[in-house]
Amino acid sequence: MENPPDFFIKSSAPNFNPNSSSISSSFDVKKITGYTIGGVSPVGHINKVKIFIDSNLNRFKTVFAAAGHPNCVFKIDFSQLSILTTGEIKEITE
C-alpha cells in the first residue's frame, strides 16, 4: 500500500483555526482523555471531549484507531466510528 499524501489542515474548516491552535502537552492529554499520547482512543475518555472525524477518511471502508495504548489499534468501519464516537464529520484536511 502506498503512503498517503501529505495533508494540510483546511484553513476554512469550521471550528479549526490553525493560527490559534496549539498542540496539547502530554500531561494535558492524559488529564483530559485518560490516555497517553500515541494511544489516545476516540472513545472512553475520562472527560467529555468533542470528537471531529475527517470526512476524507470516508474513502476507506475500514479505518484503524488507537485503542488506549501506543501499541494497540482497533479496526472499525468508518460509518461505525462516527456512530460509536458520536463524532462530527468535517472536512478537516485537504
Image (cartoon, rainbow, N blue to C red):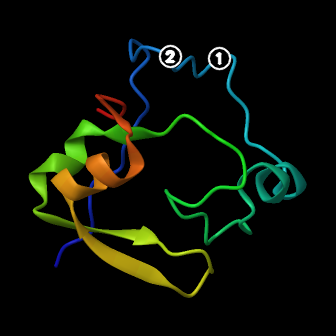
Crowd rating for badge 2 (residues with CA inside 10 Å; few <14, some 14–19, many 20+): few
Q: Give the left or right position of residue 25, taking residue 8 as reference.
A: right
Residue at 39%, 23% (x, y): give it.
10
| Quarter-of-image position of residue 40 | bottom right
Distance (Cα) linking label 1 and label 2 = 12 Å
Whether the residues at callouts 1 and 2 have beta carbons within 8 Å, the answer is no
Circle 2 sits on which residue? 15
State the residue in front, 66 or 49: 49
Q: Which kind of residue does numbered mark 2 sit on?
A: Asn
Query: Looking at the figure, which quarter contains the N terminus?
Result: bottom left
In the rendering, at what x and y percent does residue 53 appear?
Answer: 36, 41
Q: Give the left or right position of residue 3, taking residue 32 as reference.
A: left
Query: Looking at the figure, which quarter contains the C terminus?
Result: top left
Q: Give the left or right position of residue 65, taking residue 77 as reference.
A: right
Q: Is residue 86 above or below residue 72?
A: above
Furthest residue to the bottom? Answer: 71
Q: Is residue 3 above or below residue 89?
A: below
What number is the disc on residue 19?
1
Q: Secondary structure at mark 1?
A: loop
What number is the disc on residue 81?
none
In the rendering, at what x and y percent does residue 32 appear?
Answer: 77, 48
